[in-house]
Amino acid sequence: LVSRENHPDRTTVTVRGVPIGPDTVTLIAGPCAVETPRQTLEAARMAKAAGATLLRGGAYKPRTSPYAFQGLGEEGLRILADVREQTGLPIVTEVVDAHDVALVASYADMLQVGTRNAQNFALLQAVGAAGKPVMLKRGMTATIEEWLMAAEYVAQRGNLDIVLCERGIRTYETATRNTLDISAVPVVQRLSHLPVIVDPSHSGGRRDLVLPLTRAAVAVGADGVIIDVHPDPGQALCDGPQALVDGDLDELAAVMRDFPPLM
Ligand code: PEP
């Protein structure tokens, strides 16, 4: 279902009127985690100022440590919905448990499946049946074949509104948090008709790498990027070191403007 073999034209997925696909480069930005109404609104305003047309933000955070901030849950979803109301930005947010899919889908415009759940087949089937566009991150140890098969689980439930997100893979290299597999973008675009975006924030794990990796993503033909921004990353409850700040936004906007989409 996700293969390009029987579907030669590349797909555009529309999230509440916002296209992600071959004719555009979509900027999705926002806080890694929803922490407070004010922090989320400020991050959303930063995202919008940089040219973002979709707001990201985690209400359920799948953290490596059980002692780390786990997200605000439904309260976080309410904050996101409120900020959507105030900014007009549709929201992309992660769901980590199949039992929460209906609840998250009742607030979200796009459901995100994260790297740690990329082969949670019950969750993939549940998001496939939820009637909302899905962003499927690549599992951190997933081959491209495994990633596409994960997408197939979603598609099998009748949902072809799937955006694939390369977010870096686990390699022997420790200088970056993950290794951005930039070649995955054109490789997957040749194998699948689905849009492919890149997460330069979670791949590098470092603020100073976000803009160079964004340039690389856009130059290689990614259909969009998803980027963490935070009004005060020093106080962030999740992944502060990779969040862009106010001073980075002009350059981010310029990167997005300077690279017209490859046709
Ligand atoms: C995220 O985007 O909030 C996230 C946790 O990303 P990943 O699943 O790629 O680690």
Image (tube, rainbow, N blue to C red):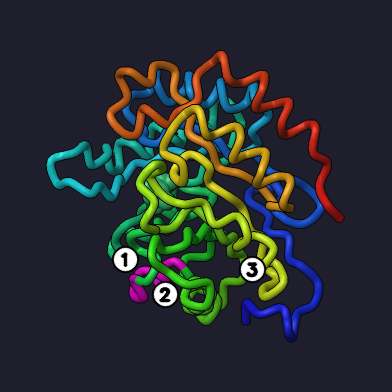
Q: Residue at x 53, y 46 (%)?
A: 199
Magenta-colored stretch includes residue 124: yes
Highlighted magenta segment, given as a residue range:
120-127
Q: Disc 3 versus disc 1: distance between alpha carbons?
A: 27 Å
Magenta-colored stretch includes residue 205: no
Q: Secondary structure at mark 2?
A: helix
Specify whether 197 is left or right of 22. Answer: left
Q: Residue at x 67, y 75 (%)?
A: 191
Which is closer to the viewer, label 2 or label 3? 3
Residue that badge 2 annotates = 125
- Compared to residue 25, the image places residue 165 above or below, namely below
* Sequence-first tag of 3 and 1: 1
Residue 59 appears at what percent x and percent y?
34, 41
Asked whether residue 94 is in view, the answer is no
Q: Quadrant of the C terminus?
A: bottom right
Q: Disc 1 versus disc 2: distance between alpha carbons?
A: 8 Å
Tags 3 and 1 touching, CB below 8 Å: no
Tags 1 and 2 touching, CB below 8 Å: yes
Residue 142 appears at what percent x and percent y?
43, 69
Tag of residue 98: 1
Asked whether residue 86 is in view, the answer is yes
Q: Quadrant of the N terminus?
A: bottom right
Which is closer to the viewer, label 3 or label 1? 3
Q: Disc 2 versus disc 3: distance between alpha carbons?
A: 21 Å
* Sequence-first tag of 2 and 3: 2
Q: Secondary structure at mark 3?
A: helix
Please state which amino acid type lies under the numbered disc 2: Gln
Specify whether 247 is left or right of 107. Answer: right
Q: CB at mark 1 closer than 8 A to ligand 1? A: no
What is the tally of numbered marks visible in this picture? 3
Tag of residue 168: none
Residue that badge 3 annotates = 188
